[in-house]
Image: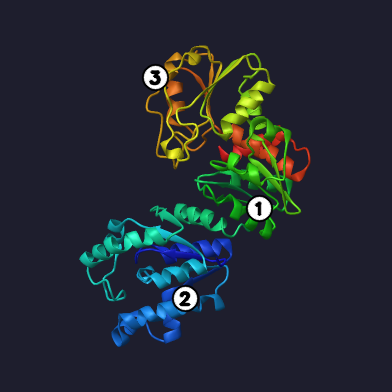
Amino acid sequence: MENNIVLIGMPGSGKSALGRHAAKELNIRFMDLDARIEKLEGMSIPEIFATHGEEYFRALETKTLEDFNNFGHRTILAVGGGTPMREVNVQLLHKIGYIIFINRNIDAIAKYMNYNGNRPLLNNQEKLYELYKERYPIYEAACDYKIDLDTNLEASVTLLKTVIRGQFPDTTYGVIGDPIAHSISPKLHDIVYRYLRINNDYAAIYVSRGGIASFIKRAIDSGMKGFNATIPHKIDILPYLDEISADGAACGAVNTIKISDGKLYGHNTDMGGLLMAVDRKGYAYKDNNIVIIGEGGAAYSIIAKAQMEQAKSITVLARNPKQEDTTKWDFLGSHPAFGEADLVFNATPLGMHGIHSDFKSFEFLDDIPKSALVYDLVYTPSETKLLAEAKKRGLTTENGLSMLIYQGLLADAYWLDQELPLDELYNVVYEAIS
């Protein structure tokens, strides 16, 4: 696969607008296939259709794609809506690069579509819906990733950039995950680097489950110095590490990876970061009863640290602990352990922005003592339904922002191999972000 990005989708879906914005912000090249054909032919697309017919134009598309590797590299290429309708074109697009389907709601396209002859195959709304019904399954089968377009241009460009960075990881550091566009880690680390006057950059990078191996190669080749890992990669990345720290080994998961001389060194800063966040609220693991909802990488880090800190008891509750699809994760419900809990942690993605699933009931909160802390590792939104319901019951609550900040600061200290003024930096970052 060549090092390019290909955008496909219906006419009016925003491929060119999104592609241009993303290319400008990522400092890479943008090309529109139709514009390229018009330049080569010396006439507009409607003129080509009127003079030579559709088959001639489709042949031009294929010929231009065949020649793309002669002039295309590190390019975002937006193609016409009909381009993927030819199997030969789909094969060429996969050779050119990573295919992203920009899926804008067809009703939104219909509302703003201009049927004035600039699009030869679209002269009325009925034809638009007919083409959408025909093309959608082709787009979906051809793409490597689908973006359901947000009406907010900035949010859509942000999402597109995270996906593109998975192919072009041109950054000093970053965070990989799926989903990842919601992450505020880039802002956090940017604040730290500016405060410390360090010339580093940090970006959110989309990497799907199963995409770790290919991303690691691109990261090493690009000169990245390290990255953080979040859902679903904290455990999946373990086989690719050359060395793992004591904290990482203790919980069987890592969230911070350093790259040096082509080797990967894994570490876990979630453990220390959450401990510092809990301490900041006036709580501790030692001699206390801990209940953890969830059984993923984040839960493992809590368990390991709680054991090290000599917690009185640790109870882990999960219904589908090994399920790959986190959107189907579910929580069993009430449990006797809640009645004696001192700290309750939500270590699942339930309630997180981008995860269309939440707790089915919050009645288990009724059993938790008023003296306990309910800590949700989710930080977007800032107040999940879990925390809102806990507050209604008079419980002390905290979202995952404090842990995020502390684990991020510990990650920077690990990457930079130096002690940092953590509490001072925490205050600077918290004030800027919150």
- Pick out the residue farthest to the right: 418
Give the mark, 3 or 1, whose residue is nearer the N terminus.
1
| Closer mark to the observer between disc 3 and disc 1 | 3
Q: Nearer the viewer, residue 9 or 281?
A: 9
Q: Is residue 115 depicted above or below 383 in this figure?
A: below
Q: Which residue is mark 3?
A: 363
Q: Residues within 10 Å of mark 1 (few under 14, many from 20)?
A: some
Residue shown at 57%/66% (left/top)?
Answer: 3
Give the mark, 2 or 3, whose residue is nearer the N terminus.
2
Q: Is residue 340 depicted above or below 277 in this figure?
A: above
Q: Nearer the viewer, residue 14 or 248?
A: 248
Q: Amino acid at mark 1?
A: Asp
Query: Does residue 230 appear to the left or right of 428 in the view shown?
Result: left
Q: Which mark is residue 29?
A: none
Q: Which residue is mark 2?
A: 65
Secondary structure of the residue carrying tag 3 is helix
Q: Which residue is mark 1?
A: 201
Check the picture and name the quadrant holding the N terminus. Answer: bottom right
The image position of residue 275, as x and y in percent, is 65, 26
